[in-house]
């Protein structure tokens, strides 16, 4: 294990002792808010410190077994036992080191949150709208595999069955943290159903993944800065949805950001949902602006945050998916379009972890 990681882990062990002392004080126990904050930190620190203690124990076991092996040249049984312990300790140490590295990485507090996933057709006309529908199906299938709930918040359908724009709410453990790297430009290369000459066309969609705001800490929006319009919803929903002005569109005047919802039957419910989407978009704008300022200090996986950046190509004639950020190419496109995104997402997460670990090492001055 690298020296800077050992230094970081030693600090966790020291901090655990400090927290145990603080939590034993009567004045802290009487301040429930402070007690809860320290208790949550204690849980996280104790988890890391516990794995660190186990790592040190197995290091000692490995050293003892290696010494036993050196001293048992004439005893085959003893040498065999020592080698088995060496193999066991080495394997567990490798696993523990990986766990500890992940535990030390900076955590995005939004990772555990639900998410809004927005898909918009781009260049390519009708083919782009059809591809937006394919992407919606792909993400919906992936969410099903994760056991997450999905709900279409708003949609603008195209004549051929795709979408000009669609917004999906995803509810599930770590939904945003899992899908956040999907933000960006998605390019498709294939022969459209409407193409009579068999020529391959290229079109594109943009995807944006936003964390659902925490209502307790969400930014406060001045009602005077909002323009709220109601209109008659379109699409599936029966007679009721087409006969009442239940759909709601909210415009944030200072930024020009717009959100709408037409999925529910009540105007009140649609307004509440649209306001959530609007808040998420405003917070994402603030996040992107902060990321742009920090870009000179640390290169982000997503780049500048510009959603028009091309991050991925779906090449149907070759059955190939390429993620350009990490030079990942997979020849399993049909499976991916059925929601099998695990390999792609895990590769992106591993890349981010490696970047964060490198930043930690630089920060430690090693």
Image (cartoon, rainbow, N blue to C red):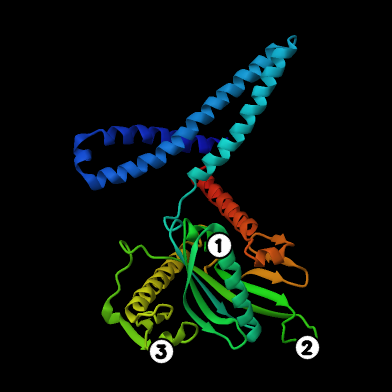
Q: Position of residue 68 (x, y in %)?
A: 65, 15
Residue 180 appears at what percent x and percent y? 52, 62
**Residue 306 shows up from this direction:** no
Q: Which mark is residue 232?
A: 3
Q: Position of residue 37 (x, y in %)?
A: 30, 46
Mark 1 = which residue? 144
Quadrant of the rendered structure where residue 191 is?
Answer: bottom right
Q: Secondary structure at mark 3?
A: loop
Secondary structure of the residue carrying tag 2 is loop
Q: Nearer the viewer, mark 3 or mark 2?
A: 3
Report if residue 59 is visible in the image: yes
Image height of 35 relative to 240, above or below? above
Label 1 crowd bin: few (<14), some (14–19), many (20+), radius 10 Å: few
Please tell me which residue is depicted at 53% across the width and 30% down the height of the picture.
55
In the picture as drawn, the residue positioned furthest to the front comes out as: 239
Q: CA distance from mark 1 to mark 2?
A: 35 Å
Asked if residue 191 lies left or right of residue 229, the reply is right
Closest to the observer: 319 or 244?
A: 244
Q: Which residue sits at x=75%, y=9%?
A: 74
Q: From the image, which quarter does the C terminus lie in? A: top right
**Which residue has dot 2 on it?**
196
Q: Which quadrant of the structure image shows residue 144?
A: bottom right
How far, Cα to Cα, is label 1 from label 3? 31 Å
Residue, far top:
74
Give percent across and percent down for residue 230: 36, 87
Proximity of marks 3 and 2: CB atoms separated by less than 8 Å: no
Mark before the other along the chain sequence, 1 or 2: 1
* Residue 260, placed above or below residue 173: below
Distance from the alpha carbon under mark 3 to that under mark 2: 38 Å
Circles 1, 2 touching at the beta carbon (< 8 Å): no
């Amino acid at each position: 294990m690298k020296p800077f990681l050992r230094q970081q882990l030693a600090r966790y062990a020291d901090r655990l002792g400090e927290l145990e002392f603080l939590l034993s004080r009567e004045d802290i126990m009487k301040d429930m808010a402070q007690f809860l904050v320290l208790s949550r930190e204690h849980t996280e620190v104790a988890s890391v410190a516990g794995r660190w203690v186990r790592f040190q124990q197995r290091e000692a076991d490995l050293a003892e077994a290696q010494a036993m092996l050196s001293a048992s040249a004439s005893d085959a049984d003893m040498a065999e036992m020592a080698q088995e312990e060496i193999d066991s300790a080495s394997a567990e140490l490798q696993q523990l080191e990986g766990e500890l590295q992940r535990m030390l990485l900076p955590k995005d507090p939004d990772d555990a949150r639900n998410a809004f996933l927005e898909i918009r057709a781009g260049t390519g006309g009708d083919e782009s709208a059809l591809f937006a529908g394919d992407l919606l199906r792909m993400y919906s299938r992936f969410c099903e595999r994760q056991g997450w709930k999905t709900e279409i918040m708003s949609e603008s359908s195209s004549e051929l069955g795709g979408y000009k724009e669609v917004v999906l709410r995803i509810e599930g453990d770590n939904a945003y943290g899992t899908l956040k790297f999907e933000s960006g430009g998605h390019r498709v290369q294939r022969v459209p159903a409407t193409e009579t000459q068999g020529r391959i066309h290229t079109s594109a969609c943009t995807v944006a993944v936003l964390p659902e705001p925490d209502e307790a800490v969400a930014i406060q929006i001045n009602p005077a800065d909002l323009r709220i319009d109601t209109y008659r919803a379109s699409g599936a929903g029966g007679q009721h949805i087409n006969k009442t002005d239940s759909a709601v569109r909210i415009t944030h005047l200072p930024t020009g950001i717009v959100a709408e919802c037409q999925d529910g039957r009540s105007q009140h419910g649609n307004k509440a949902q649209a306001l959530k989407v609007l808040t998420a978009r405003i917070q994402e704008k603030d996040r992107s602006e902060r990321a742009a300022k920090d870009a000179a200090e640390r290169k982000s996986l997503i780049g500048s945050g510009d959603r028009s950046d091309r991050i991925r190509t779906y090449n149907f004639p070759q059955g190939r998916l390429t993620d350009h950020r990490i030079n990942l190419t997979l020849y399993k496109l049909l499976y991916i379009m059925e929601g099998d995104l695990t390999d792609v997402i895990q590769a992106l997460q591993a890349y981010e972890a490696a970047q964060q670990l490198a930043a930690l090492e630089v920060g430690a001055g090693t």
